[in-house]
Image: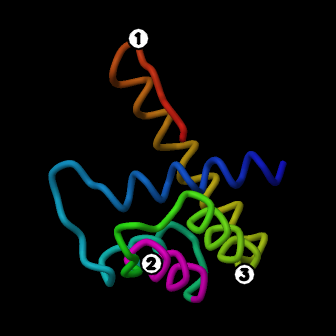
Amino acid sequence: MFSKIVITIAFFCVVVAHPSEVEFSPEDVKNALILEGLSNSGAAGITEFLYKDRSDDITAGELKAEFREFLEKLSLEDKHAIERIISRELERFFHDNGENHSIFLV
């Protein structure tokens, strides 16, 4: 279960951190997460993680360790709220875009 939550949060971070057409401010992201059911502290933590300035030469191992530390701070309720958001958005994606899709999680 924990690994499923880790994967969904990682996917969520990639989607939010790299919007294709619209740039969102940190405050926009935080407010949207609160509206979606996350606590104020959970939304603030996710927003801080997504918008944190990192060096360009950060290794995958360093980012993974930072991500694990971040996950430990989230409440169970916030993890479930994130999982619901991602599940709903994936359902919309697959329902609205036909049947031939590939998703790569790195």
C-alpha distance separating marks 1 and 2: 32 Å
Q: Position of residue 2 (x, y in %)?
A: 81, 54
Q: Residue at x 71, y 53 (%)?
A: 5
Q: Do labels 1 and 3 touch, CB within 8 Å? A: no
Q: Secondary structure at mark 1?
A: loop
Q: Amino acid at mark 1?
A: Asn
Counting residues from the start of the chain, the first of labels 3 and 2 encountered is 2
Label 3: how many Cα within 10 Å (few below 14, some 14–19, many 20+): few
Q: Residue at x 43, y 34 (%)?
A: 92
Question: In the rendered image, which residue does mark 1 sit on?
Answer: 100
Q: Is residue 16 above or below residue 88?
A: below
- Residue at the far front: name it: 57
* Residue 50 on the magenta span: yes
Counting residues from the start of the chain, the first of labels 1 and 2 encountered is 2
Q: Secondary structure at mark 2?
A: helix
- Residue 81 or residue 7, whichever sits in front: 7
Question: In the rendered image, which residue does mark 2 sit on?
Answer: 47
Counting residues from the start of the chain, the first of labels 1 and 3 encountered is 3
C-alpha distance separating marks 3 and 2: 13 Å
Q: Residue at x 72, y 81 (%)?
A: 73
